[in-house]
Amino acid sequence: MQKLIWNITIVLGVVLAGALTTSCYDDKGNYDYIRLDEIVIDTTGLGVLPAYSLLRYDSLFIPVKIRYNGKEVQQDKNAPLDYVWTIYTTHTGAGLEYVTDTIGYSPDLNAEITSLAGNYQVQLTVTHRETKVEHYFKISCQVEESITAGWMLLYERADRPGTSDVGLVVNSLVKKNITQGREYWNLYTASNQAPLEGTPVRIQRPLVSLASGTDQVICLTNKQLVSLNNATFEKVYDFEHFFYTAPATVAPKWYGPSGRMMNKHFLINDNKIHTVSYVSVTGGGNYMGDAKSADYGELAAWGSDVTASNDAVVYDQTNGRFYHIIQYTSQVVPFAAQNPDAAFDVNRVGMKMLMADWGRAGGNPMQGHDYAIMEKGNERYLIIANFCGNAADANVGLGLYNITNSPGILKATSMAAAFLGEYVLYGAGNKVYNLAYNSSTTAIEAWTAPAANEEVTCVRLQKFYFASFMQAGIIPNANQVVHIATYNKETREGKLYQYRINPASGEITGEPFVYTVPGKVGDMAWKYVMEM
């Protein structure tokens, strides 16, 4: 074992020398020497290594012995010593940013290392409170990235209301072939030194280019749209970087893909629609074009993730109707005239959209239908629409169910539509309900939070919009996991519960994975990685 002892004794002498050229001038210099207190930082026999290599967000523990004038004092608060641990980059130069962070204030270090991947020095500084003399101990530390696939959460921070941050949990339900579960919180702040402005709207890692492996994570709040490096969660794009020419008004409302087999995305900003196609892109580079608008009213914060033959499908809240941008066109137009036998007319819905999700498409694994809970006065309806047809489809409206009598429906906060079963889950109060719409329009209670003060804020089923991921078995436990997020206003604490769920019936079973979230979850999604 290498013996590591840092023993620094500093002797100060102050000499005031006068001119010695005349015999009548007395030398009044002070030649007294002051010996300072002895401070020793000792790691002998404590198992401390000369260098460390660890994954980002791992904890680093370094024990030390502090001796003051020969006496061990790290637990002695009366010793006139202050302790500060810091981590700082070892290389600087053109294009490199020097980073230093404080990670501890006690003799022993036990801290989570959130620094980005790189080479660092970890240093303990012991300062004599009276003389201000400093003593140092340092070691090398290499940090490597560790974030791959997992379950992402976008939440409003409890300690900083009005801002949002990102969490990620990794366990056997959401990632294949793992031996150790992990959880990460405030990832955005850790990589960007500040949280996102605004409250959560959406988080997703949509597909751009499978070949490149660089597809980014998109975070949308009611004030900010950013893309993040999928491995580090460092910001790659701000709002203006999504466009060839950015709009003057920054008012993002929705961002998402448009198609189960197409690499297309669209954005609703300032009540206008912007689109981009990555179909021919292998490494990124395409950007949003100019806004497309029409004579519609206020758009809902929603768009179809699973449409086909369209660049976007949106909903006009003011006039209660759907609009679409037909593929390879630039016009926002109503749908074709609908068949009178359709369950409802997508051009004349006449209701307000409250929440929506994509789900089952009659058993077709390559398609998805859109499900939405709608408001009409004091009544609530579930609608099902097929936006996967061609532009001339006259039977888009597939289902219309009056669910007003379902328990808690008037206070529903979030919904999730099943892909293999004929049911919808929705959260209301501290409960989650299962609505098997083809057998009953009255939902049954499926889950209750452990505490009465926990309010369900988000419910998601484990699926991914891109059909190949579901078909090829890339997503683990597809359709077999439900994620329920709650928030307790009194304790200002969030929770995430992850359960197995029967994909056909929606029965929630087994013991959950449970995590404490430092805020109120607004959206959740699976973060993919290419593994079989």
Image (cartoon, grey):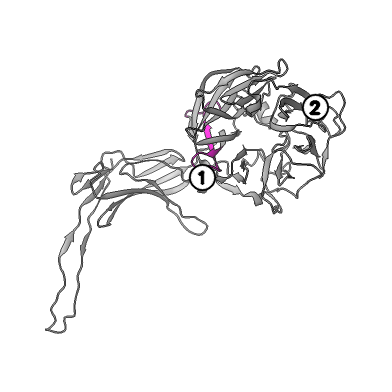
The quarter of the picture where residue 500 lies is: top right
Q: Earlier in the sequence, mark 1 or mark 2?
A: 1
In the rendered image, the quadrant that contains the N terminus is: top left
Numbered badge on residue 397: 2
Q: Is residue 164 magenta?
A: yes
Amino acid found under the numbered disc labelled 2:
Gly
Q: Residues within 10 Å of mark 1 (few under 14, many from 20)?
A: some
128 over 338 or under it: above or below: below
In the rendering, at what x and y percent does residue 393 appear? Answer: 85, 30
In the rendering, at what x and y percent does residue 203 appear? Answer: 61, 38
In the rendered image, the quadrant that contains the C terminus is: top right
Q: CA distance from mark 1 to mark 2?
A: 43 Å
Residue range of the region highlighted in magenta in the rendering: 155-180
Amino acid found under the numbered disc labelled 1:
Thr
The answer to whether the residues at label 1 and label 2 have Cβ atoms under 8 Å apart is: no
In the rendering, at what x and y percent does residue 227 appear? Answer: 61, 45
Q: Residue furthest front?
A: 378
Q: Is residue 411 magenta?
A: no
Question: In the visual, does 433 lie left or right of 511?
Answer: right
The quarter of the picture where residue 248 lies is: bottom right
Depth check, front residue: 260 or 495: 495
Numbered badge on residue 465: none
283 over 305 or under it: above or below: below
> Which residue is pictured at 70% across the width and 43% down the height?
267
Numbered badge on residue 189: 1
Label 1 or label 2, whichever lies nearer to me, is 2
Depth check, front residue: 327 or 53: 327
The kind of secondary structure element at disc 2 is strand
Depth check, front residue: 121 or 373: 373
Q: Residues within 10 Å of mark 2 (few under 14, many from 20)?
A: many
